[in-house]
Amino acid sequence: MAAPMNTPSCKIGPSILNADLSDLASECQRMMDSGADYLHLDVMDGQFVPNLTFGHPVVKCLRPKLPGVFFDMHMMVQNPEQWIDGMHDAGADQYTFHYEATNDPKKCIRKIREAGMKAGIGIKPDTAVDVLVPLVDLVDMVLIMTVEPGFGGQKFMQNMMPKVQFLRDHFKGVDIEVDGGVGPETIQHCAEAGANMIVSGSAVVKSDNPRETMQHMRNIVDNSIQKSLLER
Ligand SMILES: O=C(CO)[C@H](O)[C@H](O)COP(=O)(O)O
């Protein structure tokens, strides 16, 4: 059955947070060679979350080593406005910021678009999904965190699935990303709720067979998408 134009497709984006960061370019390449659709790059500033990773100078070094790869920058930073230009100059494709980190999410979205990137907006587990309603039509993707942001390898919060389901019910065509504790054991919940952009860190980078792990998750999400089309 052919999917209608506004049906989002499954995309798998490994998070490299728990990969060998001393060998970041090779780890990213390994993920792409194993069938990833995009890379989810976690930027942390030690303020918005109690952890630090890297900023746009590292992204600038990665860009020429991974030509054509879609970089989804997960900006776990306070005042996300301040890094938009730097990330764009470094070669980022999508700038996903947190609703909780800015006083003016609409202005932030506008600045991201003016810089020439796609815009994503995410919420932490304690934030109600309602805050996204006036913003969904302004962005390319919404991110529902399924762990408290800051660290890889945490337990998946299944009680976040009603947020995903709510967004899928009200915004059929939007890309919905889930992030945190997502892997072969939890993917069914994400798929059934309607997530189509799947961030998976530890489960993929530490897998003996990342290709098989990603393919397994893709099959489950694709099956759910097909099922929802038949039910329409
Ligand atoms: O944003 C994140 C944490 O803040 C990571 O992307 C996320 O936790 C992925 O790692 P894992 O799949 O191991 O949970």
Image (spheres, rainbow, N blue to C red):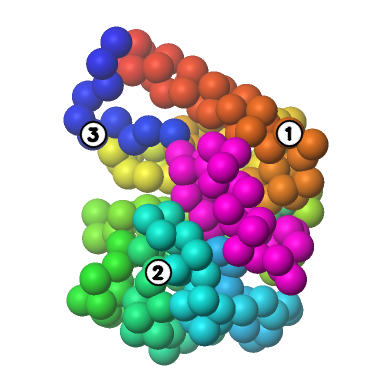
Vertical comparison of 94 with 103: above or below: above
In the image, residue 38 lies in the stretch drawn in magenta: yes
* Residue 193: x %, y % from top left: 51, 32
Q: Residue at horizontal 61%, vertical 79%?
A: 54
Q: Residue at x 47, y 60 (%)?
A: 66
Q: Nearer the viewer, residue 121 or 87?
A: 87
Pointers 1 and 3 in contact (CB under 8 A)? no
Q: Earlier in the sequence, mark 1 or mark 2?
A: 2
Residue 137 x, y percent position in the rendering: 24, 54
Q: Is residue 142 magenta?
A: no
Looking at the picture, tell me which residue is in the foreground, 102 or 220. Answer: 220
Instruction: Decide which of tag 1 and tag 3 comes sooner along the chain.
Output: 3
Residue 158 image position (x, y, % from top left): 67, 40
Quadrant of ligand 1: it is bottom right
The N terminus lies in quadrant: top left
Q: Amino acid at mark 1?
A: Asn
- The quadrant in which residue 80 appears is bottom left
Left/right of residue 128 with respect to residue 107 in the rendered view: right
| Marks 1/2: CA–CA distance | 28 Å
Q: Nearer the viewer, mark 1 or mark 3?
A: 1
Q: CA distance from mark 1 to mark 3?
A: 32 Å
Q: Which of 7/131 is in front?
A: 7
List the residue tagged with mark 1: 209
The answer to which of 131 and 52 lies nearer the viewer is 52
Magenta segment range? 11-40
Q: Which mark is residue 6?
A: 3
SS for callout 3: loop
